[in-house]
Amino acid sequence: MRKIRILLFCLWSLALSTATAQHWQTVYITGSLMQYAMPASEFAGLFVSPLHPKGSMGVTYQWNKNLTHRVLQNVSIGFGYHRFVQSIIPLNTEIGYRYQSQKKIFFNVFLGGGYLHSFPLNPPYVLKNGIYERTGKFGRPQAMFNARIGIGYLFKKMSAIEISYENLFQTP
């Protein structure tokens, strides 16, 4: 039941975003690097710990008409890979604030949540009658929450570069 509620929340957010099409801004593709650690505890480890690739694509919706102070919603799907542990497919939405100066420099703050499906890279086994047998489980559904801050530069109306720091939380 809990998994169904999370999926319905994601679909509701997507349906809510598509309600009016005049404020759609961009379709985006991102590439990033992930590090597995306890929440917000390994900031210094960004420079020494192993990093793992993650990519996503999505759309951005602008809720207001102000060009300096924007309220934005992103809806995205992605794929992440950890060499020894798991692969993930996140489907999430996030809402946030963007301040954009006249010189095309912007600052973002986003909070979000959604559905994350993780696939263990080592096949799961269970002990039955003294013998290990492979289980037929196809990954693990989870909830995810994220918080992100970033700064960037807008080149033209549809292209920008941004550097951001994000905490992504996987639950149960």
Image (spheres, grey):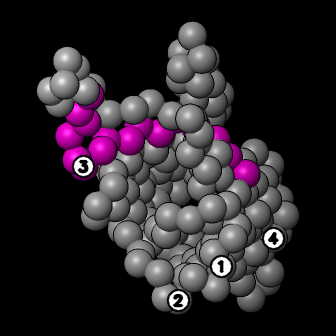
Residue 123: quarter of image: top left
**Prevailing SS of the magenta stretch:** strand
Residue 19 visible, this angle? no
Asked which secondary structure carries label 4, the reply is strand
Front position among marks 4 and 1: 1
Which residues, given as a range, are shown in magenta? 111-126
Mark 3, other Cα within 10 Å: few <14 / some 14–19 / many ≥20? some
Q: Which residue is mark 3?
A: 121
Asked which secondary structure carries label 3, the reply is loop
Q: Amino acid at mark 1?
A: Phe
Mark 4, other Cα within 10 Å: few <14 / some 14–19 / many ≥20? some
Residue 160: quarter of image: bottom right
What residue is at 23 percent from the left and 33 percent from the top?
125
Left or right: 157 in relation to 98: left
State which tag comes first along the sequence, 4 or 3: 4
Residue 116 visible, this angle? yes
State which tag comes first along the sequence, 3 or 1: 1
Residues marked 4 and 1 touching at CB (< 8 Å): no
Q: Position of residue 127 (x, y in %)?
A: 25, 27
What residue is at 47 percent from the left and 68 percent from the top?
34
State which tag comes first along the sequence, 3 or 2: 2
Q: Amino acid at mark 3?
A: Leu
Q: CA distance from mark 3 to mark 2?
A: 25 Å
Q: Which residue is mark 2?
A: 47
- Viewer-proximal residue among 90 and 131: 131
Q: CA distance from mark 4 to mark 3?
A: 41 Å
* Residue 43: numbered disc: 1
Residue 15: quarter of image: top right
* Residue 69: numbered disc: none
Q: Which residue is mark 4?
A: 99
Asked which secondary structure carries label 1, the reply is loop
